[in-house]
Image: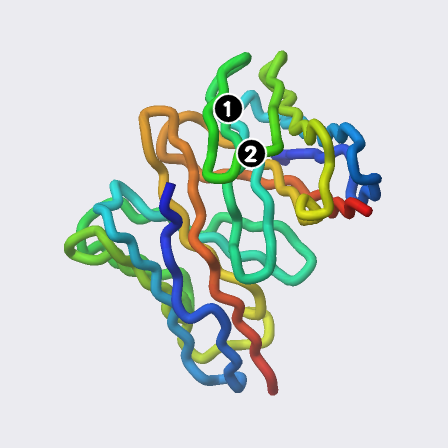
Amino acid sequence: DVKVTQSSRYLVKRTGEKVFLECVQDMDHENMFWYRQDPGLGLRLIYFSYDVKMKEKGDIPEGYSVSREKKERFSLILESASTNQTSMYLCASSRRGNTEAFFGQGTRLTVV
Amino acid sequence: GQQVMQIPQYQHVQEGEDFTTYCNSSTTLSNIQWYKQRPGGHPVFLIQLVKSGEVKKQKRLTFQFGEAKKNSSLHITATQTTDVGTYFCARLTGTASKLTFGTGTRLQVTL
């Protein structure tokens, strides 16, 4: 059974903290994605990685960075968390080509 | 980047009624995917369309890709309470298959 695992289901952080969200997939997929989901705005792509150490900005990369040191792991970093980064964060992975994406369970991050 | 727009944003139907959500793009799409997200869950892949005018069916769900490949629709016949959730269309772009989602349509079904 395919699996994308996000390290935390719920997270509460303080403004200004550096926050790491981790995502691991066990399907040997080339592509990994980070999205944030907010009511009425759908799923917005933050960053995309198509190979180890390779990344591409999505639609809303400001305030975020990513790291992909190993194929199975894709980390999202909030350099200095702000309250407007309170959201649901979803990680996904897929094989290269026109294939379906598999999602993790999501991390609900609250920045106070 | 421009998101693919979906309409309506929300629809509430009685069980047994039909439901349609539309996905519109200002640019030609090479393909379109559809996902369903149940309340409290994560998006799950339903189907992919790649050909102009393509129509695919999954039981009560009918998916269509426009002739000009700028729009797509998902139609559910005789909705059931199990159809509740948010339906997203998504497009793949580039050789590395970047996946960008639409704004989603939330469906509520009541008895």
Q: Are marks 2 and 1 in contact (CB under 8 Å)?
A: no
Q: Nearer the viewer, residue B89 or A41?
A: A41
Is residue B87 rendered to the left or right of residue B84?
left
Few, some or many residues within 10 Å of mark 2 (<14, 14–19, 20+): few
Q: Nearer the viewer, residue A36 or A30?
A: A36
Q: Quadrant of residue A32?
A: top right
Q: Quadrant of residue A62?
A: top right
**Secondary element at tag 2:** loop
Q: Residue at x 49, y 76 (%)?
A: B11
Q: Nearer the viewer, mark 2 or mark 1?
A: 2
**Secondary element at tag 1:** strand
* Disc marking residue A49: 1
Q: Give residue B63's position: percent from left, percent from top.
A: 33, 60
Hey, what amino acid is under mark 2?
Glu
> Circle 2 sits on which residue?
A62
Q: Residue at x 38, y 72 (%)?
A: B20
Q: Quadrant of residue B6?
A: bottom left
The answer to whether B41 is drawn above or below residue A49 in the figure is below
| Chain on which label 1 sits | A
Hey, what amino acid is under mark 1?
Ser
